């Protein structure tokens, strides 16, 4: 029963997108099952597939894993994207958690009420440019290496490139004061597996649109 | 430069409490510096100790660690509370993710308006009894072992006990429909390091009170009310 990992989620980015990125960066092919109706979701729950009644769900190596962080940590460990020792893992975890706090703001953005959207966009811009991006700019400048941790591609680099692109979609010139991150973005985008993922026809999902939001809200009865 | 880990946080539970629990469960002594004033916080910021300008901060093994999950994962691995292999670690991470989500509802509780507190309390109990507790009850029932993962004491057990006790503070008989969890609670509470942590005089912090809320608000300049989830 091994075979490709199988991802169950809505047909869109949401909380599953970092998983798609990580698998793609690691060069691992995967299958996807898209939730399109409330009935499908209720069946998953009834069949006991979702430990906490939530997606993302990733079926891999005989496990039905839920909880995005658990899934990502497992994949990072399995595909050697988690550093060489406990201390490198700690650095990667710290960086990933920080980046996740930023991408969480982008995740929630489409679900915020219309009159809050402008304020939320300002918050994203402020956090990206004054809290998160300066940290990674400094890390890269200080060690002068191509990757964030241990001079080797890790989960932290994949999360960062994903976050940069997501913020740029909202604020195109957001990297203007961050030359290290601009170079990082170019380098990462040119890595073969990531370059492939960034091309049309890959499993990468587009930014959430009205249809996606409606679908999620309908299925989760939000 | 080994020495005791040093925890920087407010004098209260918040996001640091899980770290106190885990270190205590592992039998590791630690020091604490409590943030009481805005000036202290700004000094930490200016000193460059806070990678993302936030606490918790834990100084351990020459690192200034921030981000609670990163801190906890490091401690769990260092003190052999993270399972024996990648798959056990995945299960522990999954279980901890659930208890973290549950405790997240409680974390914001002290900062809610009185009206929202009532609604939140009901939500906490509903989530605990219909989503989270049944999941762990089933895990324990299915394998019949003393601990959640790999027949060995792990971070997942510590985190679950912490969550159970916190929910019980909101509703004393909340474990009524969960015999496995009742037995689990008794077993884990009697582990010597945990028993010690549960006794008066330990570094366990009490239920957040108004003074705690005021301190956090004034240090972080967070004077607005948080919205209930």
Image (cartoon, rainbow, N blue to C red):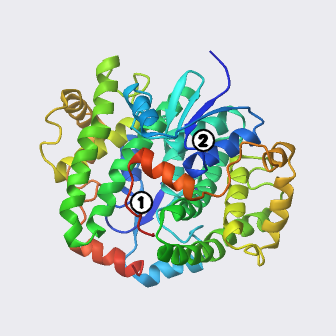
| Residue A46 as seen in the image, left or right of residue A197 | right
Q: Position of residue A97 (x, y in %)?
A: 44, 44
Q: Residue at x 40, y 26 (%)?
A: B48
- The chain identifier of the residue carrying mark 2 reads B
- The N terminus of chain B sits in image quarter: top right
User: What residue appears at the point 73 percent right and 46 percent down from the top-left corner?
Assistant: B154
Residue B185: x %, y % from top left: 80, 61
Work out whether residue B144 can be spotted: no
Q: Is residue A25 left or right of residue B83?
A: left
Q: Label 1 neighbourhood size at 10 Å, few (<14), some (14-19), many (20+)?
A: some
Residue depicted at x 52% and y 72%:
B117
Residue A187 placement: quadrant: top left
> Where's residue B58, x and y in %?
56, 33
Q: Nearer the viewer, residue B21 or A165?
A: B21
Label 2 SS: helix
- Mark whose residue sits in front, 2 or 1: 2
Q: Nearer the viewer, residue B134 or B86?
A: B134
The residue drawn where x is 74% and y is 56% is: B148
Could you say which quadrant of the image residue A204 lies in?
bottom left
* Residue pointed to by mark 2: B72
Determine which of the numbered discs, if any, sits on residue A31 in the image.
Answer: 1
Q: Quadrant of the C terminus of chain B?
A: bottom left
Q: Is residue B138 above or below residue A190?
A: below
Instruction: For mark 1, give the secondary structure.
Output: strand
Q: Work out how far the residue at label 2 is from the one at label 1, CA to CA, in angstroms.
A: 32 Å
Q: Is residue A40 above or below residue A9?
A: below
Q: Would you say residue B76 is visible in this rendering?
A: yes
B126 vs A89: above or below:
below
Q: How many marks?
A: 2
Q: Nearer the viewer, residue A95 or A45?
A: A95
Q: Label 1 lies in what chain? A: A
Viewer-closest of A184 and B11: B11
């Amino acid at each position: 029963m091994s075979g490709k990992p199988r991802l169950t989620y809505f047909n869109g980015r949401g909380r599953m997108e970092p998983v798609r990125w990580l698998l793609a960066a690691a060069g691992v092919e995967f299958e996807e099952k898209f939730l399109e109706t409330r009935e499908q979701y209720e069946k998953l729950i009834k069949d006991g597939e979702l430990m906490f009644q939530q997606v993302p769900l990733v079926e891999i190596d005989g496990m039905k894993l839920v909880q995005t962080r658990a899934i990502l940590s497992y994949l990072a460990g399995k595909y050697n994207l988690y550093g060489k020792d406990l201390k490198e893992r700690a650095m990667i975890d710290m960086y990933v958690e920080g980046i996740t706090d930023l991408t969480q703001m982008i995740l929630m953005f489409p679900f915020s009420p219309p009159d809050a959207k402008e304020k939320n966009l300002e918050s994203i811009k402020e956090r990206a440019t004054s809290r998160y991006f300066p940290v990674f700019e400094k890390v890269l400048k200080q060690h002068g290496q191509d990757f964030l941790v241990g001079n080797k591609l890790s989960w932290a680099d994949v999360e960062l490139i994903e976050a940069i692109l997501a913020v740029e979609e909202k604020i195109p010139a957001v990297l203007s004061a961050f030359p290290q991150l601009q170079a990082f973005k170019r380098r990462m985008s040119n890595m073969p597996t990531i370059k492939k993922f960034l091309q049309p026809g890959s499993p990468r999902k587009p930014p959430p649109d009205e249809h996606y939001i409606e679908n999620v809200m309908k299925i989760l009865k939000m | 430069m080994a020495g005791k880990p040093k925890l920087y946080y407010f004098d209260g539970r918040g996001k640091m409490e899980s770290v106190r629990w885990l270190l205590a469960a592992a039998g590791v002594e630690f020091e604490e510096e409590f943030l009481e004033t805005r000036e202290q916080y700004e000094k930490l910021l200016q000193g460059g100790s806070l990678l993302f300008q936030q606490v918790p901060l834990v100084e351990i093994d020459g690192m200034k660690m921030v981000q609670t999950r990163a801190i906890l994962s490091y401690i769990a691995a260092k003190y052999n509370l993270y399972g024996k292999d990648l798959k056990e670690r995945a299960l522990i991470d999954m279980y901890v993710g659930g208890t973290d989500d549950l405790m997240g509802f409680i974390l914001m509780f002290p900062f809610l308006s009185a009206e929202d507190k009532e609604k939140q309390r009901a939500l906490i109990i509903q989530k605990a009894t219909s989503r989270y507790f049944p999941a762990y009850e089933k895990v324990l029932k299915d394998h019949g072992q003393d601990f959640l993962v790999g027949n060995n004491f792990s971070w997942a057990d510590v985190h679950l006990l912490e969550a159970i006790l916190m929910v019980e503070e909101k509703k004393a008989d909340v474990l009524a429909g969960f015999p496995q969890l009742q037995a689990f609670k008794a077993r884990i509470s009697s582990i010597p390091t945990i028993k010690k942590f549960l006794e008066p005089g330990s570094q366990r912090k009490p239920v957040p009170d108004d003074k705690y809320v005021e301190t956090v608000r004034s240090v972080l300049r967070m004077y607005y009310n948080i919205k209930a989830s």
